Image (tube, helix red, strand yellow):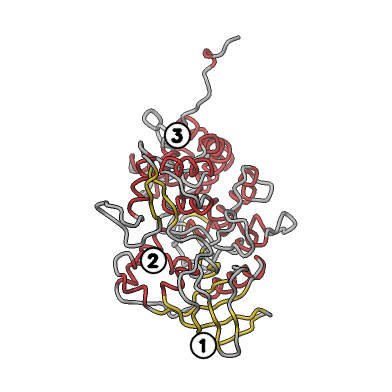
């Protein structure tokens, strides 16, 4: 979540309103956001003012989420709009009905502002409700979509929503549908990044709120049905990780291909993500000769035991594909940070981690040492992992150091090299009382 998302989450659960300090304490209590600032309460206060009506601040947001009232010496903040609040008169739309796999779907045009008001995102693993299938937002994609919209573009493909409000329901006719404009009444099944980009663009251009988009509406779907729609859309438009189906359906260890699929998805993401230190480094099946430096099979075999249903990620309650990927990406970016200091990452002949022994050794080291320390610190941030290593008196191992050694010995040397630079919290022998 962003800080603003975390504030909204807290105030949704505390409709009577809270002070900035109380909001901050609730965010910490529920682990909605991890603060790195020296004055986190001040950060919360600034975000409240930016998104608050009538607040005086140098960089206000055009989108107003909060209201404020003075009670004695305290300022009490509330959500500007609460779930179930009526945002306008019921609107009637001409629709096209389609039945797909037994699910009735109604498609019609709607303004961006109306869609933004009636919809909300339910993230799997975070929101305990039927139909929660969405993933964590990617800030770079949102920024890219915002630029796309501000350049005068709009979307032709539909936004898919699932109406969940049982108090105010749409009334479906043969050719039209009456939609009550009630705040946060429909889960966004597909289009969360596009809508987030549109909202960001509206902060700079209010006129975007009146633009039309196509909406496809289903009524009161359960999670499995919502997941089928989500996977169907994304498998056709943009491939999503194959193992995502396990997250959505909760399939467990009976599925024999789970570990291989999850490891393969992580490997492909490492290769495709421009922010990954292994961007375009992994050799995929069918690649032209000379393209890629690290075999896909090496990456999959190194990971599959750790990402299985009884692997170390699962034992630490880290189940979601996106979280597993981000953790490993942060870890290797931390190693890259130290390797870049001595010009060893970008030079293939100097980069041990582009070799099978280096990658496997680094993975083994992560799950043996780094994972435990990150769990203890409750943080997998890249900057946190960077500080776990000190190579000032340790020479980072290179491929030349493992020439003429067997694979097992080479991997062992990589682990030993990382351990020599790893800042352990264990006391020395002389520090113990006997």
The answer to whether the residues at label 3 and label 2 have Cβ atoms under 8 Å apart is no
Separation (CA) of disc 3 from disc 1: 59 Å
Residue position marked by numbered label 1 in the rendering:
94
Q: Earlier in the sequence, mark 3 or mark 1?
A: 1
Q: Is residue 308 left or right of residue 295?
A: right
Residue occupying image coordinates x 52% and y 53%: 325
Q: Residue at x 54, y 81 (%)?
A: 178
Residue 213: percent from the left, percent from the top?
43, 78
Frontmost residue, 157 versus 4? 4
Give the camera-side residue of 160 and 65. Answer: 65
Residue 387 position by quadrant: top left
Q: Is residue 57 left or right of residue 428?
A: left
Residue 182: x and y in percent read 51, 69
Up the image or down, 288 lies above or below 262; here it is: below
Which residue lies at the image location 66% right of the left edge and 67% below the top edge?
Answer: 222
Q: Is residue 303 left or right of residue 59?
A: right
Q: Is residue 275 above or below residue 162?
A: above
The front one of 22 and 255 is 22
Mark 1 to mark 2: distance in Å? 25 Å
Does label 3 or label 2 sit earlier along the sequence? 2
The answer to the question of whether label 3 and label 1 lie on touching residues, with beta carbons closer than 8 A, is no
- CA gap between label 3 and label 2 equals 38 Å
Point out which mark residue 411 bears.
none
Q: Position of residue 282 (x, y in %)?
A: 48, 57
Classed neighbour count for the residue bearing mark 2: other residues with Cα under 10 Å, few (<14), some (14–19), many (≥20): many
The residue most toward the top is: 434
Query: Which mark, residue 388?
Result: 3
Q: Is residue 264 above or below residue 170?
A: above
Vertical relation: 92 (above or below) 363: below
Pick whichever of labels 1 and 2 is earlier in the sequence: 1
């Amino acid at each position: 979540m962003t800080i603003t998302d975390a504030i909204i989450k807290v105030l949704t659960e505390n409709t009577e309103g809270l002070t900035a300090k109380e909001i901050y304490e609730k965010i910490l209590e529920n682990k909605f956001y991890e603060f790195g600032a020296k004055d986190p309460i001040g950060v919360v206060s600034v975000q409240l003012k930016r998104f608050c009506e009538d607040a005086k601040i140098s960089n206000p947001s055009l989108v107003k989420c909060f209201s404020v009232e003075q009670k004695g010496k305290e300022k009490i903040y509330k959500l500007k709009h609460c779930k179930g609040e009526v945002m306008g008169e019921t609107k009637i739309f001409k629709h096209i009905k389609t039945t797909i796999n037994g699910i009735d779907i109604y498609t019609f045009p709607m303004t961006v502002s109306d869609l933004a008001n009636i919809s909300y995102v339910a993230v799997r693993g975070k929101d305990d409700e039927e139909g929660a299938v969405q993933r964590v937002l990617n800030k770079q994609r949102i920024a890219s979509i915002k630029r796309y919209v501000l350049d005068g573009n709009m979307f032709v493909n539909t936004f898919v929503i699932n109406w969940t409000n049982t108090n105010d329901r749409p009334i479906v006719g043969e050719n039209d549908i009456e939609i009550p404009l009630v705040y946060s009444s429909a889960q966004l099944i597909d289009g969360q990044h596009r809508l987030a980009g549109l909202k960001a663009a509206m902060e700079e251009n209010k006129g975007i709120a009146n633009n039309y988009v196509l909406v496809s509406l289903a009524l009161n779907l359960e999670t499995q049905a919502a997941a089928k729609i989500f996977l169907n859309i994304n498998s056709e438009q943009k491939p999503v990780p194959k193992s995502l189906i396990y997250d959505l359906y909760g399939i467990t260890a009976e599925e024999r291909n789970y570990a291989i699929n999850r490891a393969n998805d992580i490997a492909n993401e490492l290769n495709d993500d421009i922010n990954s230190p292994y961007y375009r480094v992994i050799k995929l099946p069918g690649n032209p000769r000379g393209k890629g430096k690290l075999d896909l099979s090496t990456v999959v075999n190194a990971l599959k035991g750790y990402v299985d249903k009884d692997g170390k990620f699962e034992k630490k309650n880290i189940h979601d594909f996106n979280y597993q990927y981000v953790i490993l990406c942060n870890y290797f970016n931390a190693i890259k940070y130290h390797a870049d200091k001595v010009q060893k990452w970008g030079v293939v002949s100097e980069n041990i981690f582009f070799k099978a022994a280096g990658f496997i050794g680094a993975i083994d080291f992560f799950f043996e040492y780094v994972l435990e320390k990150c769990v203890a610190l409750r943080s997998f941030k890249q900057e946190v992992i960077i500080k776990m290593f000190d190579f000032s008196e340790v020479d980072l191992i290179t491929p030349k150091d493992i020439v003429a050694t067997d694979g097992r010995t080479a991997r062992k040397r990589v682990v030993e090299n990382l351990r020599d630079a790893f800042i352990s919290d264990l006391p020395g022998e002389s520090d113990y009382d006997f």
